[in-house]
Image (cartoon, rainbow, N blue to C red):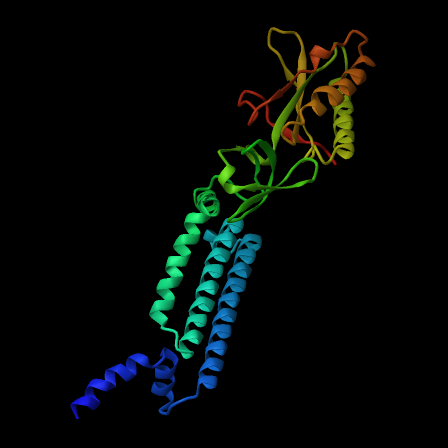
């Protein structure tokens, strides 16, 4: 009698998890084939459930982003999707990893030993793949600490300075698109510094001095025409429609000027400093032959000074 009671715990220890669960819910024993099939079905069902949750979350994000519904916390769409995908990938890996352990247990492999050996192997791999771990850690840092986001125009100091628009922040690489429409993959561990350009580009301002005795409205229309022609021809560099400001008089200077605002790709200021300035000066010389290059200075700043009159949008 004592032998039967002492053998009972040993028999239960040798039973697989799925065998005990199946017997508990069905009330009778099961075959190995049945349990293996049940493991596969449960793993696939769990995986499909996780993917459905990810699809639903991304749908909610897109809906809240376009319609501005009460889900205000989801408006940071790219970052939230990246985090959701990371969580889903981790859960999916855990599901199949544990499912493989349950299958091996059906063939006599100890589940505890399987989990322990997998942990040791994972630790060994992590020591041999320090670069991969660094990529993941820095990728998570970029995502959670708002260093940059998808759609931002940034300059990344990695092995070499790289300027471009952020397309994706992954666990291994950050993907950028540069001014030449090249896709650049930057390993996260090489990122030393991130400089974010405000509002998606560089603000370039050309201050056009109005020639003496010229009609201000006519000069504005000429400059607007030149700026629009530049935008039409160099749309890959000039990111937005140029904006023309109103005429301002310089007190004590005896002249008036207006400002043309361009949003351009970083590092492409030569287009405004040379091409636009030359065209503007040529147009002004038709009104005043003594007009000089210095009368169209080009400056750069994050935002227009408060003392300057607000810009008006060019008429269609």
Q: Residue at x 44, y 84 (%)?
A: 32
Percent across and percent down for residue 291 are: 76, 9
Location of the C terminus by quadrant is: top right
**Residue 175 quadrant:** top right
| Whether residue 91 is visible | yes
**Left of 222 or right of it: where is 167?**
left
Percent across and percent down for residue 9 are: 24, 82
Q: Residue at x 44, y 48 (%)?
A: 128
> Looking at this view, is 6 or 266 the one in front?
6
Location of the N terminus by quadrant is: bottom left
Query: In this view, which residue lies farthest toward the right?
Result: 286
| Whether residue 70 is visible | no
> Looking at this view, is 312 or 197 the one in front?
197
Percent across and percent down for residue 249 are: 63, 14
Q: Residue at x 53, y 43 (%)?
A: 149
Query: In this view, which residue lies farthest toward the left?
Result: 2
Against 262, residue 209 (above or below) is above
Q: Residue at x 40, y 62 (%)?
A: 118
Against 129, residue 106 (above or below) is below
**Left of 17 or right of it: where is 235?**
right
> Looking at this view, is 101 or 143 the one in front?
101
Percent across and percent down for residue 72 are: 47, 52
């Amino acid at each position: 009698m004592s032998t039967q009671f002492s053998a009972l715990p040993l028999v239960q220890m040798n039973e697989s998890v799925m065998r005990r669960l199946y017997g508990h819910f069905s009330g009778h024993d099961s075959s190995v084939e049945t349990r293996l099939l049940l493991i596969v079905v449960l793993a696939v069902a769990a995986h499909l459930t996780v993917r459905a949750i990810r699809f639903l979350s991304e749908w909610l994000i897109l809906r809240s982003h376009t319609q501005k519904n009460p889900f205000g916390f989801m408006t940071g769409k790219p970052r939230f999707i990246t985090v959701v995908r990371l969580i889903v990938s981790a859960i999916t890996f855990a599901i199949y990893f544990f499912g493989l352990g349950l299958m091996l247990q059906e063939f006599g492999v100890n589940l505890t030993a399987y989990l322990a050996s997998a942990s040791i192997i994972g630790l060994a791999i992590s020591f041999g793949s320090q670069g991969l771990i660094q990529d993941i850690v820095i990728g998570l840092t970029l995502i959670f600490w708002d260093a940059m986001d998808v759609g931002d125009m940034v300059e990344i100091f990695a092995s070499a300075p790289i300027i471009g628009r952020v397309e994706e922040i992954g666990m291994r690489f950050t993907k950028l698109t540069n001014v030449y429409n090249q896709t650049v993959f930057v390993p996260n561990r090489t990122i030393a510094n991130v400089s974010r350009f405000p509002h998606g580009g560089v603000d370039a301002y050309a201050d056009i001095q109005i020639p003496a005795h010229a009609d201000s409205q006519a000069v504005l229309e000429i400059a607007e025409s030149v700026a629009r022609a530049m935008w039409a021809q160099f749309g890959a560099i000039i990111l937005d429609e140029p904006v023309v400001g109103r005429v301002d008089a310089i007190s004590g200077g005896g002249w008036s000027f207006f400002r043309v605002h361009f949003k351009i790709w970083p590092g492409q200021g030569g287009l405004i400093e040379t091409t636009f300035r030359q065209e503007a000066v040529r147009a002004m010389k038709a009104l005043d032959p003594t007009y000089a290059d210095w009368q169209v200075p080009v400056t750069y700043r994050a935002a227009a000074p408060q003392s300057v009159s607000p810009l008006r949008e060019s008429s269609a």
